[in-house]
Amino acid sequence: MSGLLAPTVNLSILIGIMVYYLRAPIRAFVSDRHNTLRDELHRVRDLLAQAQTKYNEFTGKLKSMDAEIISLREQAKQDAAASKTRIIADAKKLSTTIVTDARASAQGLYGQLKSELFAEIGAQVLDRAEVLMRERLTGDDRVRIRQEFSKQVESVQ
């Protein structure tokens, strides 16, 4: 025990000297550290409050964006329905115009074809009549036709 007494006394003296000289700096350090932590805690609380405010603001904006998106979707649906109606109406008008033009063209072609057919049939009838007249007319018939034609020409003059 006597071997422990000298180091214990030395340690006690060292601790006493350290407490005497280091009390003020340690106290200042602890006080500064306390103030720093307190200020940091206030700053973090302020930042937390700002973050909470921004969070609430952005949450509100997101909710309003959801409502706006729904509104835009509805508007797009209404615009699409209006466009569909307009396109269908335009298509009906166009189809009516096409049908009217087609009928007019068909009637014109029908009239033209009818004229051509009458002309062709007339020409064929005349050709056939000429052939039949050549085959069936005798010399006496020809003389009689010439005389009748001459009389008709003389009566006109």
Image (cartoon, helix red, strand yellow):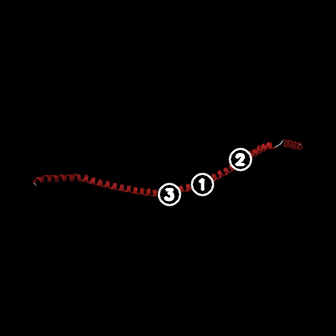
Precedes in sequence: disc 3 or disc 2 = 3
Image position, residue 87 (x, y; %): 59, 53
Label 3 close to label 2 by CB (< 8 Å) = no
Q: Residues within 10 Å of mark 1 (few under 14, many from 20)?
A: few
Depth check, mark 3 against mark 1: the one in front is 1
Image position, residue 132 (x, y; %): 78, 44
Image position, residue 106 (x, y; %): 68, 49
Q: Which mark is residue 70?
A: 3
Tell me which corner region of the image, top left, top right, bottom left or bottom right, holds residue 35.
bottom left
Q: Residues within 10 Å of mark 3 (few under 14, many from 20)?
A: few
Q: Residues within 10 Å of mark 2 (few under 14, many from 20)?
A: few
Tell me which corner region of the image, top left, top right, bottom left or bottom right, holds residue 47.
bottom left
In front of the other: 140 or 78: 140
Q: Quadrant of the N terminus?
A: bottom left
Secondary structure type for disc 1: helix
Secondary structure type for disc 3: helix
Q: CA distance from mark 2 to mark 1?
A: 36 Å
Disc 2: which residue: 113
Depth check, mark 2 against mark 1: the one in front is 2
Q: Quadrant of the C terminus?
A: top right
Q: Name the amino acid type tagged 3.
A: Ile
Q: Left of 23 or right of it: where is 5?
A: left
Q: CA distance from mark 3 to mark 2?
A: 63 Å
Image position, residue 7 (x, y; %): 14, 52
Q: Residue at x 54, y 56 (%)?
A: 77
Q: Name the amino acid type tagged 2.
A: Leu
Q: Left of 23 or right of it: where is 85?
A: right
Q: Residue at x 32, y 55 (%)?
A: 37
Q: Which mark is residue 88?
A: 1
Q: Name the amino acid type tagged 1.
A: Ile
Precedes in sequence: disc 3 or disc 1 = 3
